[in-house]
Amino acid sequence: AATTITLHLAPSKAGGHTPKAPHFFSEDNLVTYDGPQTVRSDGRGGFVLTLSVSPDGPPDTKKLLGVVTSENGWLAGGSLRGLRVAAEFQPTTVAARSGAASGSGGAGSRAATAKPAAGGLAGTLLLAAIGGLILNLMPCVFPVLGLKILGFVNQAGHQRSKVIIHGLNFTLGVLLSFWTLAGVLVVLRAGGNQLGWGFQLQSPVFVYVLTVLMLAFGMNMSGVFEFGLRATAVGSDLQSKSGYAGSFFTGVLATVVATPCSAPFLAPALGAALAVPPVESFAIFTAIALGLALPYLLLSIFPQAVKVLPRPGGWMETFKQFMAFPLYATAVYLVWVLAAQTGEEGFRSVLFSLVLVAMAVWMYGRWTAPGASPGRVRFGVASLVLVGALGLWVGWPRSAAAQTTGPDAAPAVAWEPWSPEAVAKLHSEGRIVYVDFTARWCATCQANKRLVFHSDEVLKYFAEKKIATLRGDWTNKDPRITAELASYNRSAVPFNVIWMPGKDEPVILPELLTAGTVLEALKKG
């Protein structure tokens, strides 16, 4: 199957205007929305675009459908920002003619009429708003917004003005968050960076913090702890302000967690936002934000619509606890993302850190329950801070290099798979053979890995002596490794041996290794 599509853009008959930075946006996901697009002149005033085919696109499509934009428009004065493309595929070329003209292409190609994008910017804004509206049904967003629905149910008996303020604060939180993302994109793009939607998820630090938040919010919804129960004694005015702030930050959170789910529904609009001038980009992000916030803004403006929702009751607590599970699922998904970003050891640190964070949250909830004495509350808060800080320290992604490739990318011994035949062959060649029997579930093995096999001294000596290194991985059942261990009267790992040239029996090393122990054994032979 083809991996690229070549799109030929013939020059406009109007002439006198050179479009800048043409970019194609697919209607049917045939072209990867965030993939590379190369643009070159055809030498006749037109352009040739090479587009990347999406693996998720329609398999048997016969037409290229979409919109091709230009930063300064296709006609003089900046008008006609988008051209509608509906071109049939040819064995070698597909042509689109700028302007409203149509005609036949050169030999071997069919002409395609390029019309202005349906509705221009207005059509893109409508598409963006619809995409934002659909986001409310996504598993990344629905758990957070489910809380907002419960809030409207609770507020149904309040003054209408207060309910409207809650809705406006929520909308403001969504808007400011999307504007912030749009601003960062515009600034970085102006600096020459190639960015796509969801770029913040490329940062392991951001993904880790979001994972911790999803876990904490899930535990809150499961009833492990409650924020704000003790605030009832402060007074209704402070409680009201806190509620408004809560509505605002719910909007912020909705934006943050929406990004992993947004691409399938917002790809064309987001792609356009990343290619058009800043003002139009902000307009598109605003449309997405308003679409996301629209249902809740309408419920606040027309509170009578809340009457169709069930009355407050015990179902609310059940619903709240049930909605914790999508949050846990989101946390699991983010941990999976982190596994690819931080490497094996970083991933392990993240898992342990989440256990500590969960413990900190549990301690806070256990000792700050309603009716707890001031001393117990102070202990609960201190536990949250200290244990939580320890957890964050354990799991926090480290250096930039570690964020990109993970700790396992540091210099380490290059292992080959162990087998009796490999040992015999290498030993017969007169080489020193170092064999490490290990398993991922073996804590001592992991300690040896960190203390010894990343050691500069050990790596240097192994390289100088051209030592052959073989590893037998016993993580899963392997009868050959089991038999080999039994031949030495062993039934567990770690087990390390060194076969020296000219000797029939190997040197057996202790279970817990140090760099000095290994080097001493190698030098003594």
Image: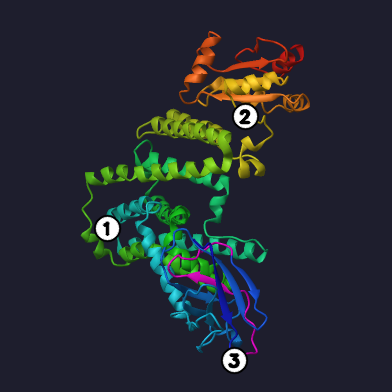
Let me know if residue 26 is in the magenta part: yes
Q: Looking at numbered disc 1 in the image, what kind of residue is underneath it?
A: Ala
Mark sitting on residue 416: 2
| Relative depth, front residue between 101 and 117 | 101
Q: Looking at numbered disc 3 in the image, what kind of residue is underneath it?
A: Ala
Residue 341 vertical placement versus 7 (above, below): above
Q: Position of residue 140 (x, y in %)?
A: 40, 52
Whole-Å distance between the Cαs marked 2 and 1? 67 Å
Q: Choose mark 2 or mark 1, whichever is in front.
A: 2
Q: Position of residue 317 (x, y in %)?
A: 28, 43
Q: Does residue 171 appear to the left or right of 41 in the view shown?
A: left
Q: Looking at numbered disc 2 in the image, what kind of residue is underneath it?
A: Glu
Q: Position of residue 353 (x, y in %)?
A: 52, 33
Most common secondary structure along the magenta stretch: loop
Instruction: Inspect this view and state whether residue 161 appears.
Output: no
Q: Position of residue 117 (x, y in %)?
A: 47, 79
> Badge 2 local density, few (<14 within 10 Å), some, or many (20+)?
few
Let me know if residue 507 is in the magenta part: no
SS at badge 3: loop
Mark sitting on residue 156: 1
The boundaries of the magenta stretch are 14-36
| Relative depth, front residue between 202 and 299 | 202
Q: Does residue 388 appear to the left or right of 72 in the view shown?
A: left
Whole-Å distance between the Cαs marked 3 and 2? 66 Å
**Would you name the residue on which mark 3 appears?**
14
